[in-house]
Image (tube, grey):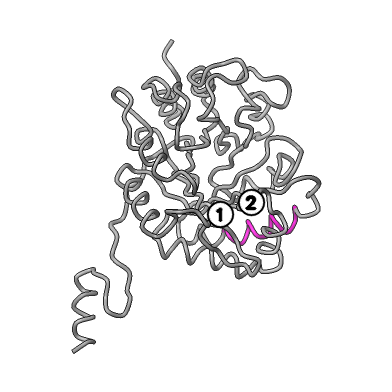
């Protein structure tokens, strides 16, 4: 009797008595030229959801974003993955944001970070070095369990960590292979110059492995910034992979580096070479609550330059 009931439920696409997952409709994602990613931090889920679902005039985030990164997971020293210890981080929050993203053609990504204690590099390193195979397996299993569309690696290390480059790249290589077999995306977050880990000097090895790479300069880089901090210099460092570069922009600032949020995005739109990584989805600065800024973000996504 129990076996018969379970078979019937599974045939209907429902959760069975044996724990089969609920069927989930396959999403149809935006076709894009450059990625436009935004993060939901674990400590601000309601505020992020409210901003994401807002419309500003005739447009909003839902019309421009290609990747919604849920920064909800941390590694364990044994190569596992665990939810961040923040109220509201749970399966229900993930599936709610996943379903919203999929309804708008947005890939919803599992973002793993080592920030419960800021920049806990020993924790990250234990996972991707000492337990690399388990870490890759557990990341993929958790992504599959929640029907997510890829993994964003936000593991950050302070100071001189270039000695860890080889093992980090080996980990990313294995993870990339697993995700590509499943037609899922892999993205990563990097420091914008030569300090800390991963950093700009690692880009040549990372770009072939990923679908997007955020240069985490935020308010420290800009269209009119000097030297390495200019968007043009970041583009030059990315070279032939510039289309995968997600220029980090701060949603809590307007202006920064001498230009408004709209001017910064219009520069990127007009350049037509790179994507955007927006930290974060709360969108606290007033400049991010206008239709013009989201039309510019959509132009970046589509590779459509602004008409003069």
Callout 2: 10 Å neighbours few (<14), some, many (20+)?
Answer: many
Chief secondary structure of the magenta span?
A: helix
Q: Is the residue under label 1 in contact with that under label 2 (CB below 8 Å)?
A: yes
Secondary structure under badge 2? loop
On-image quarter of the N terminus: bottom left
Which residue occupies 47% across, 36% down? 36
Question: Where residue 128 sits: x, y (%)?
Answer: 66, 62
Left-right relation of 123 to 56: right
Magenta span includes 173: yes
The stretch in magenta equals 165-176
Residue 230's label in the rendered image is: none
Label 2 vs 1, first from the N-terminus:
1
Which residue occupies 18% across, 78% down? 8
Residue located beneath label 2 in the image: 155
Callout 1: 10 Å neighbours few (<14), some, many (20+)?
Answer: many
Which residue occupies 69% across, 43% down? 204
Residue located beneath label 1 in the image: 112
């Amino acid at each position: 009797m129990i076996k018969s009931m379970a078979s019937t439920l599974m045939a209907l696409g429902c959760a069975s008595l044996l724990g089969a997952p609920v069927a989930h409709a396959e999403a149809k994602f935006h076709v894009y030229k450059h990625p436009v990613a935004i993060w939901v931090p674990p400590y601000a889920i309601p505020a992020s959801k409210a901003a994401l679902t807002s419309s500003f005039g005739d447009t909003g985030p839902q019309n421009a974003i290609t990747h919604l990164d849920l920064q909800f997971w941390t590694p364990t020293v044994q190569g596992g993955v665990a939810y961040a210890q923040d109220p509201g981080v749970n399966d229900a929050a993930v599936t709610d944001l996943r379903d919203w993203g999929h309804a708008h053609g947005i890939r919803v990504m599992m973002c793993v970070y080592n920030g419960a204690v800021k920049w806990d590099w020993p924790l990250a390193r234990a996972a991707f070095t000492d337990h690399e195979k388990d870490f890759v397996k557990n990341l993929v299993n958790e992504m599959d369990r929640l029907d997510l569309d890829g993994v964003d690696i936000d593991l950050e290390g302070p100071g001189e960590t270039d000695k860890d480059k080889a093992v980090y790249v080996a980990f990313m290589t294995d993870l990339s292979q697993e995700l590509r077999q499943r037609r899922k995306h892999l993205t990563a977050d990097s420091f914008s110059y030569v300090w800390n880990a991963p950093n700009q000097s690692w880009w040549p090895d990372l770009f072939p492995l990923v679908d997007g790479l955020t240069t985490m300069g935020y308010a420290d880089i800009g269209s009119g910034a000097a030297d390495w901090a200019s968007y043009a210099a970041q583009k030059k460092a990315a070279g032939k992979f510039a289309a995968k570069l997600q220029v980090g922009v701060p949603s809590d600032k307007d202006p920064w580096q001498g230009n408004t949020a709209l001017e910064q995005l219009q520069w990127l739109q007009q350049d037509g070479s790179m994507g955007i990584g927006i930290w974060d989805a709360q969108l606290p600065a007033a400049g991010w609550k206008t239709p013009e800024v989201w039309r510019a973000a959509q132009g970046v996504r589509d590779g459509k330059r602004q008409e003069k």
